Image: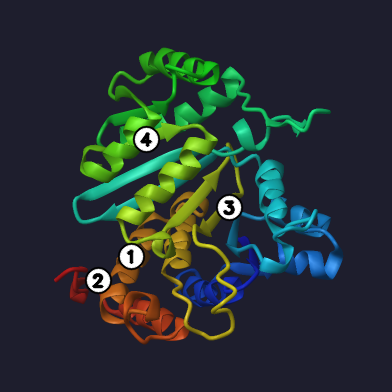
Amino acid sequence: MKIVCLPGDGIGPEVVGAAQTVLRALVPEVELEEHLLGGVAIKETGSPLPPETVSACKGAEAVLLGAVGLPEFDAAEVRPEQGLIGLRRELDVYANLRPARQGAVDLVIVRELVAGLYYGARGAKADGTVFDTCEYHPDQIERLARRAFELAGRRSGRLMSVDKANVLDTSRLWRRVVTELAAEYPDVELEHMLVDNAAMQLVLAPGQFDVLAMENTFGDILSDVAAALTGGLGLAASASLGDGRPGIFEPVHGSAPDIAGKGIANPAATLRSVALLLEHGLGRPEEARALAAAVDRALETTPTPDLGGSATTGEFADAVLASLLVPEHERRPAGE
């Protein structure tokens, strides 16, 4: 049972290190293997995604990623983020799950991840005009929509498909494919919403949503809005899944180089990503639920400096471990 860990840049090695400690405690038989990705990979190999990393990931049950990005590469031709985008393409992890949960809000954004504006043709014209192209094939929309319908069927039976069908041809195709597919999922209630209205509704009344499906760029933006409503990017986890293994599991936050090496990074988002890994990557839902609850308790009892506390990265991980070691009947639910 091999998991490839890609610590990456900045605080990535610190939060992944904490996650490895917890993961070993929960699944002692797991084999953890580290490889290079991002800025550190550029420095050592010249490439943000070395072939050895791709090969190792393809042979793993799951991939746990820390963070990529360093200021010194911001204006460079070869950038750390290219490694992450390339890895998503190599593994064809087309469905990005972004849960957002706090209080009355409990939703999941299902974002298409390997097509659309970020992967379309781009370039420059002789007159100085530059362009990026948003393209979608019906098959790319259908496979993402199936994931969303299936997830909605396991939750509340409600799916909101988000598009811009009043303006964009790609969105009109999106709406048509999703609507036609709905006939195969009679137990799921499908609604459509324009992306600008969806953004406003997420801010004003997020509790109305359960599962939302959308294309790549819309999902990139709206998932950050949802994260801001439920604690911020520093607490947000994600799972990027394909039709088989491995998936990529990673926190949503950046590499935060300004605090790297200080031992104060909050590992909650990475640990929540490990919970998604346990559920979707290793098929261990009980351990996933236990870890998610332990993280919630640690956020209350052992907050890191970003949350107004003083706990170090290691102390937070220790609090999660201590909570997990308490017999289930003695555990105090988060919030009590």
Using the rendered view, name the quadrant where residue 10 is placed.
bottom right
With respect to residue 322, does 333 lie above or below?
Answer: above
Disc 1 or 4, which lies upstream in sequence? 4
Q: Residues within 10 Å of mark 2 (few under 14, many from 20)?
A: few
Mark 1 touches mark 2? (CB < 8 Å): yes
Q: Position of residue 181 (x, y in %)?
A: 43, 17
Q: According to the image, label 3 marks what residue? A: 248
Q: According to the image, label 4 marks what residue? A: 212
As shown in the figure, which amino acid type bears the numbered disc 3?
A: Ile
Q: Nearer the viewer, residue 11 or 16?
A: 11
Q: Residue at x 41, y 42 (%)?
A: 222
With respect to residue 132, does 98 lie above or below?
Answer: below
Q: Is residue 301 left or right of residue 85?
A: left
Q: According to the image, label 1 marks what residue? A: 290
Which quadrant would the N terminus be assigned to in this image? bottom right
Q: Position of residue 300 (x, y in %)?
A: 26, 75
Q: Secondary structure at mark 3?
A: strand
Disc 1 or 3, which lies upstream in sequence? 3
Q: According to the image, label 2 marks what residue? A: 328
- Marks 2/3: CA distance? 29 Å
Disc 4 or 3, which lies upstream in sequence? 4
